[in-house]
Amino acid sequence: MIGDYNAKVIAHQAIPQALRIAASANQLNVEFQWLSTVSLGEDVSKKLSSCQGVWCVPASPYKNMDGALAAIQYAREHFIPFLGTCGGYQHAILEFARNVLNLTQADHAEVNPDTDFPLISQLVCSMIGENGKIFLLENSKIQAVYNQLEISEQYNCSYGFNRNYLDLFAGCDLMISGFDVEGDPRCIELTNHPFFIGTAYQPERSALDGNNHPLVNQFILSTLSINNSNLI
């Protein structure tokens, strides 16, 4: 778990439950640990090399954005199953833009309000505690996880992928795989990675009602192909 743990954050309360529910459903023993972003420096590879999966969690801005981005980059380049929810989704987009598309000035407006390149910008309408409909791209990896084209999920965010920059990602390996009713991006995935999915919403919240979310469930199953350890 990449993020700065806060017991008061609902998503942080829900994530351990979501993992346990998915593990139980699949008769697996799943161990996990939290890695604060401030603990991630040049030794990211050492800290993540034994992990079978990386989940970049909500509650940004992170204390150390560079540490979060480095962890995402490691998961992307080493084909480690990755799930990014809410803030994790936002930073997965930013990491790809900077390190793959060489858009080094791309930034997060919450961290740098004066940026000339607000790739992640403030939403016109806040999605704090809101539910919304999402249309999934047919034949995408996330559509296969849900096995349906239309879903409804719960958000808790005020920032998101700035649709003014969508054309910069045309034809690359990062695909927008889900849109809301207004046509704004809500899910991303990497086409050249076994499991690398980011969502603007928080699927982990379903665990608070005791539900095994299909996305968390598939994330757990995807880690079985990584043989280094059983840490997430």
Image (spheres, rainbow, N blue to C red):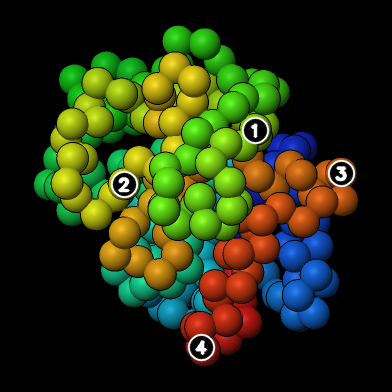
> Could you tell me how far apart the alpha carbons at marks 1 and 4 are, in whole angstroms?
35 Å
Say which quadrant the N terminus sits in.
bottom right
Task: Please name the residue shown 39% across and 58% down the image.
Answer: 72
Q: Is residue 19 above or below residue 111?
A: below
Q: Which residue is mark 1?
A: 152
Q: Which mark is residue 175?
A: 2
Q: Which mark is residue 228?
A: 4
Q: Are marks 4 and 2 in contact (CB under 8 Å)?
A: no
As helix, strand or loop, the secondary structure at mark 2 comes to strand
As helix, strand or loop, the secondary structure at mark 3 comes to helix
Task: Please name the residue shown 49% across and 26% down the image.
Answer: 180
* Quarter of image, res 163: top left
Residue 44 horizontal/vertical position (percent): 39, 68
Residue found at the far top of this picture? 124
* Quarter of image, res 40: bottom left
Q: Which residue is mark 3?
A: 209
Task: Please name the residue shown 82% across and 71% down the image.
Answer: 24
Mark 4 vs mark 3: in front = 3
Mark 3 vs mark 2: in front = 2
Amino acid on which disc 1 is placed: Ser
Looking at this view, is 35 or 232 the one in front?
232
Residue found at the far left of this picture? 102
Amino acid on which disc 4 is placed: Asn
